[in-house]
Amino acid sequence: MAKTASKAAKKAAAKKAAKKPAAVKKQAPAKKRPAEKKPASGGDKQRFTLYGSMTSGPTYTVGLMLSLCRHPFSYIHVNLREGQHRLPDYMVKNRYGQVPTLRDGQTFLVQSAAILEYLAESLGKFEGRTAHERQRIREWLFWQWDKLALPILRLRARARGFRQFGDEVRVMYDTEAKTALAVLEHELARSEWVVGRRPTIADVGVYGVIRYAAEASIDLSPYPHVAAWKKRFETQPGFGTPEQILPMESRLL
């Protein structure tokens, strides 16, 4: 009897096991595909807004950089003669009360040399390729404002009636400008570009000053390598004159 009961129990257990559904193997979660990069939309046009004046050399320098990078930008004209650069709403954007100011999103950037570095890094164009090149570019940008821009732009301002000083000061600035040009001539005699084998923001910054040499009554013919570099730079794609790049009035994209 015990053997019969044992056999019956085994049969019953076998039937229950047969009724249970087969264990379902868990499938590994599907691997997520990397998100596809969306192409730049037209909204990118609203990224940059440049505040400045068409007659301002530093404003032109930043506008030239954006043009060379083929990046559109809105433009807000700041009337310097009416003192708009000293009004509270502008001083909030530029604590120095100067032009240019570049807005990138919610960030306001000032000082044209610093803006050039920012654009080179954020747009990945006209930057130095090595730490050594980046350092040399920075040195030239600092030198440019210390030795080249100051005399040339002040002589230009005098010629345009924005500044007044006598002949003694004019001769001093003229001498300083020519000394700086001699330094640049020596460098460009060894290389087609200011730093490295291609144009960088060092060239953009220096050109933004050399552009106004004629208005400062400075002849570039004694500096043939500077004159040749200037012509070479003006053939770069995206190049434009101040009149071509900067409007006289505000322009919103």
Image (cartoon, rainbow, N blue to C red):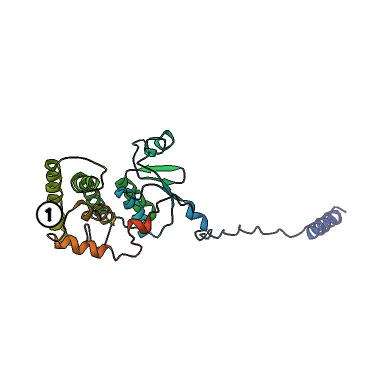
Q: Residue at x 43, y 56 (%)?
A: 72
Across and down, in percent, residue 47 comes to: 46, 51
The answer to which quarter of the image holds residue 9 is bottom right
Q: Residue at x 26, y 62 (%)?
A: 233
Across and down, in percent, residue 39 comes to: 50, 61
* Residue 94 visible: no
- Element under label 1? helix
Across and down, in percent, residue 207 comes to: 25, 56
> On the rendered structure, is 49 left or right of 127?
right
> On the rendered structure, is 28 left or right of 234?
right
Q: In this view, does 29 lie above or below 162?
A: below
Q: Name the residue under label 1.
A: 182
Q: Nearer the viewer, residue 160 or 181?
A: 160
Q: Which of 182 and 197 is in front in this view?
A: 182
> On the rendered structure, is 35 left or right of 82?
right
Q: In which quarter of the image is the N terminus?
A: bottom right
Identity, as a three-letter code, of the amino acid under mark 1:
Ala
Q: Nearer the viewer, residue 210 or 55?
A: 55
* Residue 148 visible: yes
Outermost residue to the right: 1
> On the rendered structure, is 42 left or right of 193?
right
Across and down, in percent, residue 49 comes to: 43, 48
Q: Nearer the viewer, residue 121 or 93?
A: 93
Outermost residue to the top: 88
Q: In this view, does 253 lie above or below 88?
A: below
- Callout 1 crowding tier (Cα within 10 Å): few <14, some 14–19, many ≥20: some
Q: Which residue is drawn at 67% across and 59% down?
A: 25
